[in-house]
Image (cartoon, grey):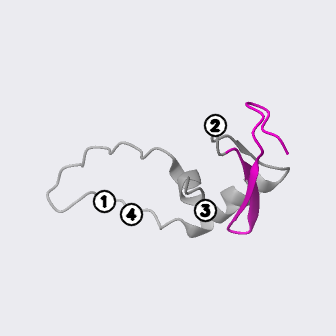
């Protein structure tokens, strides 16, 4: 299958049992029906549990951390 953006031949990769089509040139990712749902479901089951509420030992709240770019999709793709 050709990339709809630049016409490059798409590469098929399997990650966690989900077949993913991606373009090595523009790095676009295309999913078939239901594949995004599978990825989301599997990312929830593999996420670490959230930290307990109640603050820290020193009595002040920690500054919010910036979210890492990529999120759960970054773990699926290694290109």
x and y percent of residue 68 in the render? 42, 47
Which label number is shown at residue 44? 3
Reading the image, the residue beneath label 4 is: 51
Given this view, does label 2 or label 4 mark the residue nearer the observer?
2
Reading the image, the residue beneath label 1 is: 54
Tell me if label 4 and label 1 are in contact, CB under 8 Å. no
Q: What is the spatial separation of the Cα atoms under label 3 and label 1, in whole angstroms? A: 23 Å
x and y percent of residue 43 in the render? 61, 61
Q: Quadrant of the N terminus?
A: top right
Residue that sits furthest to the front in the current view: 8
**Are there few (<14), some (14-19), or many (20+) residues within 10 Å of tag 4?**
few
Given this view, does label 3 or label 1 mark the residue nearer the observer?
3
Given this view, does label 4 or label 1 mark the residue nearer the observer?
4
In the rendered structure, the answer to whether residue 68 lies left or right of residue 79 reads: left
Reading the image, the residue beneath label 2 is: 26
Q: What is the spatial separation of the Cα atoms under label 3 and label 4, in whole angstroms? A: 15 Å
């Amino acid at each position: 299958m050709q990339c709809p953006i630049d016409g490059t031949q798409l590469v098929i990769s399997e990650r966690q049992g989900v077949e993913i089509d991606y373009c090595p040139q523009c790095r676009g990712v295309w999913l078939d029906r239901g594949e995004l749902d599978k990825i989301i479901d599997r990312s929830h089951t593999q996420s670490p549990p959230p930290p307990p509420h109640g603050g820290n030992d020193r009595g002040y709240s920690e500054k919010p951390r910036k979210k890492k770019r990529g999120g759960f999709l970054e773990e699926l793709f290694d290109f």
